[in-house]
Image (spheres, rainbow, N blue to C red):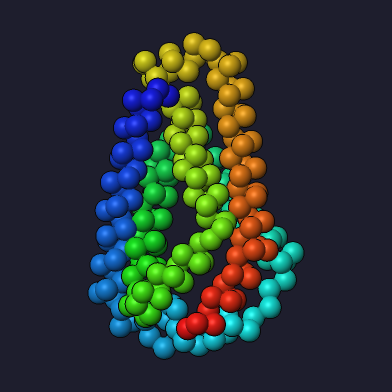
Amino acid sequence: MGKDEKSRIYTIWFYLFLGSFLSGVLLMNFGSDRLLGEEGIFSASSMNRLKYVEIDGGRFFGYVLKQRMGSFALLLLLSTTALGMISVYAVVSWQGILTGMLITAAVIRYGLKGLLLILGSMFPHQCLLIPAGIMLLGWCSENYGRIHGTGRMAFAYGKNRNQTILRSGGSLLWILFVTLVGCILESYVNPILITDLVKIF
């Protein structure tokens, strides 16, 4: 995939994410009565529980790893099918909606402190997981193109097949490694930060 093609795809993803984000904001605003009740997202009771919860890092790591790698494997599998590109766009849309809803909920509940809560819940693991996720979506897009491409795209991938496979395999291993490190940070570092952060709420 050339630079122009990558730039075009990333631009599409950006606007798709932005539109989905705004949809998430609207959904949370219109559904705030139901979604932000006493037991809703970021409720006082749930925040109080977080202040005193003790997380077993090893067990939490196993859970996080299973969830992340399960999604990882599913996207890779779908990239080999006719649903490959649809699944990529679906992931971008879902992440946009979810992000919009979470940020809006936190701000409605706690104002500027809500933004701090969101940032704290993302640090430091998302500094790795977000780039890894974008790289994975790019890899899946290229894999779909290699398998289902026609015309010029198929010729471009078939021209240096062995070199393409090696480069693709190396990229996938790098994405896997970055994701693994992100899971370690999410399991062992982020819970400490969150436990301290929620004490200001």
- Residue positioned 46% across, 36% down in the render: 138
Q: State the image quarter where residue 13 is shown.
A: top left
- Residue positioned 35% across, 60% down in the render: 97
42 lies above or below 131: below
> Which of the pair 16/103 is nearer the observer?
103
Q: Position of residue 108 (x, y in %)?
A: 33, 77
- Residue positioned 44% across, 27% down in the render: 145
Number of marks in the rendered image: 0
Q: Is residue 57 visible?
A: yes
- Residue positioned 30% across, 40% down in the render: 12
168 lies above or below 132: above
Q: Position of residue 163 (x, y in %)?
A: 58, 16
Q: State the image quarter where residue 10 is shown.
A: top left
Q: Position of residue 2 (x, y in %)?
A: 40, 22
Horizontal relation, residue 60 to residue 198: left or right: right
Q: Position of residue 99 (x, y in %)?
A: 39, 61
Q: Residue furthest right?
A: 58
Horizontal relation, residue 127 to residue 86: left or right: right
Horizontal relation, residue 78 to residue 97: left or right: right
Horizontal relation, residue 91 to residue 46: left or right: left
Q: Residue furthest top?
A: 159
Q: Is residue 75 visible?
A: no
Quadrant location of the N terminus in the rendered image: top left
